[in-house]
Image (cartoon, helix red, strand yellow):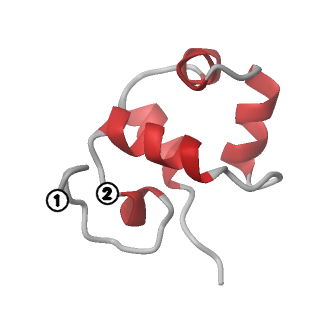
Amino acid sequence: MDRPNRIEDLRFDADKTQLEIAKILHCQREVYRRYEKGEREIPVWAAIKLAEYYDVSVDYLLGLSDKRRHFNQ
């Protein structure tokens, strides 16, 4: 199943660079780029951290839901 690339969209909406988000995740920019492009599966801990950072549900972040909810809902 082809899911929307929400982590890239959320980054653009937040006006952040890949490097800025990589620093939040404490990883190299290239590693984050691979998550964003779907070349590498995003680890659960990183998905949770990004969902919290962007204040969206993990389901929304991963493209499993189109319903945008806050992180803690």
Quadrant in which the C terminus is drawn? bottom left
In the picture, measured across the screen, residue 45 lies left or right of residue 69, that is: right
Outermost residue on the bottom side: it is: 1
Q: Secondary structure at mark 1?
A: loop
26 and 67: which is toward the camera: 26
Q: Which residue is mark 2?
A: 57
Residue name at image x 29 percent, y 50 percent: 56
Count neighbours of disc 1 (C-alpha within 10 A) and say few if under 14, some if 14 to 19, many if 20 or more: few
Q: Secondary structure at mark 2?
A: loop
Count neighbours of disc 2 (C-alpha within 10 A) and say few if under 14, some if 14 to 19, many if 20 or more: many
In the picture, measured across the screen, residue 49 lies left or right of residue 43, that is: left
Q: Position of residue 30 (x, y in %)?
A: 81, 27
Distance from the alpha carbon under mark 1 to that under mark 2: 7 Å
In contact (CB < 8 Å): disc 1 and disc 2:
yes
- Inspect the image, locate mark 2, and give the three-letter code of the amino acid beneath it: Ser
In the picture, measured across the screen, residue 35 lies left or right of residue 20, that is: right
Establish if 15 lies above or below 34. Answer: above
46 and 60: which is toward the camera: 46
Q: Choose the circle earlier in sequence order: 1 or 2.
A: 2
Q: Which residue is mark 1?
A: 73
Establish if 45 lies above or below 14. Answer: below
Residue name at image x 64 percent, y 77 percent: 2
3 and 44: which is toward the camera: 44
Establish if 4 lies above or below 8. Answer: below
